[in-house]
Image (spheres, rainbow, N blue to C red):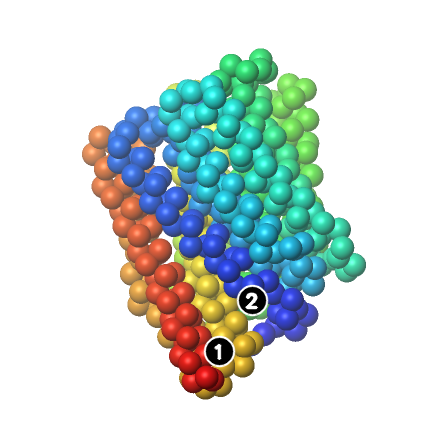
Amino acid sequence: MLPLQTGLSFEQAPPITVPFRFFLTAPLFLLAAACLLAWFGPAALQMRQAPATLALTHLLTLGVMSMTMCGALMQMLPVIAGSPIVHPRLTAALCHGLLTLGTPMLAAAFLTGNHALGLASTAVLGCGFGAFIVASGLSLARIRTCNSTVISMGLAAIALAVAIPLGMVLLLARIGSINIAYAQYAELHPLWGSIGWAALLIIGVAYQVVPMFLMTPDYPKHLTRMLAVILFALLVVKTAAVLLDASPPMNAGVDTGLAAGLTWFALTTLRLQAMRKRRHADPTQRYWRLAMSALIVAALGGVMLRWVSAEAAEMLKLVLGMLFIIGFVLGVISGMLYKIVPFLAWFHLQSRHLRQVPIPNMKTLMPDNRALAQMRVWLCAVIMLAAAMVLPRVFTYPAALLLAAAAIWLEWNLLATVRSYKNTRRLAMAKKI
């Protein structure tokens, strides 16, 4: 069994239903994204601003990525920072319910162009993310001692608070409610959502979970002190450069800095994994290796955008976006779910002092062979999606099928762990009586 790291306040962890409701919903949105891809086919992979592409992207970024990350932050803030979320059950139910409702509404608004649906989805998602940002902000404000993980989490929450209004403005402009410089906001929104919200949160969480779950040395102090702050500062500079229409060299310098920071994190993570205490590579470690490889390709590919034609740049942005979202972010999320979900199940069974029945260990709650098989399907889906960008008529439908299979398999594996947790608790309670 994994050792509980010192400095972590597991006794302040929220009820297990708080993170689990988010974790179990995310694969269903991945399945919905796969179904949408199968329905629209190559049309969903041709232009970034096409309705089907936007619907697909937001099913992934809101329904899978943000859904899981909100649940993870609600779980980890009390444990890492010792500052619980206010009314965790109520906050989780509110945020989860509004995100679950608002995400398909937004996808439908993109697909239909319906003005009323667009306004409604903006209101629902705005309230859902607003409640989450306020709750996490109050939790962060109560922290007395900040470490590198807390700082990175705080900056990620600020980035989310920037990305969401930008997205709402873009949607309102798209449905004709307001008139803005659409191209500028369309460039900034994904930056704050991907690098600011997703990457900064993953980086901060990695400082804790990679050494804990993957048995690696700690991240270097100079990286943990500097990286999140540098990336956030570069995002601020990039925003100013875009809004003020700065010179191309300045934009190129900021883009190179962002790519270098992300590559630094990815290479360091791969190096730490090569130094891990256990030589056997479990599914989570393999997920992390593949995710870091996708991040390196996406980061370096972003620097190359300025040296290709406009038509090639459009296709390259689609490929890089897919690698970042599905390869990097969803790769890390899937890998960590295979550790966090069984760990939480084991921990909550232990904390209830259920001595009447043997408590299954993590490998029993989530066998490696099940996770490894699902990971292979996910990897094939990523490869097939990349191929679909080049030959969409040939590879789009197999990619959608593989993505759907990976989503169903992930959900099935997570539900199997939850069933084992519930069965163990039920048997223990019955013996108590």
Q: Crowding near pointer 1: few (<14 within 10 Å), some, many (20+)?
A: few
- Tell me: residue 365, above or below residue 100: below
Q: Crowding near pointer 2: few (<14 within 10 Å), some, many (20+)?
A: some
Q: Is residue 373 left or right of residue 164?
A: left
Nearer the observer, disc 2 or disc 1?
1
- Tell me: residue 116, above or below residue 101: above
Q: Is residue 358 left or right of residue 204?
A: left
- Tell me where residue 299 appears, x and y as whole percent: 50, 40
Residue at image position (50%, 67%) is 344
Q: Nearer the viewer, residue 50 or 59?
A: 59
Determine the secondary structure under disc 2: helix
- Tell me where residue 368 appears, x and y as whole percent: 35, 68
**Residue type at mark 1?**
Met
Q: Nearer the viewer, residue 310 or 371?
A: 371
Can residue 365 be seen here? The reply is no
**Residue type at mark 2?**
Pro
Marks 2/1: CA–CA distance: 14 Å
Mark toward the start of the polypeptide (2 vs 1) = 1
Q: Which residue is mark 2?
A: 211
The total of numbered circles placed on residues is 2
Q: Nearer the viewer, residue 393 or 157?
A: 157
- Tell me where residue 61 appears, x and y as whole percent: 47, 40
Among all residues in the image, which is located at the extreme left?
394
- Tell me where residue 222 appears, x and y as whole percent: 69, 56
Determine the secondary structure under disc 1: loop
Q: Which residue is mark 1?
A: 1
Marker disc for residue 147: none
Residue at image position (51%, 14%) is 176
Which quarter of the picture shows residue 233? top right
Q: Is residue 166 left or right of residue 317?
A: right
Can residue 75 be seen here? The reply is yes
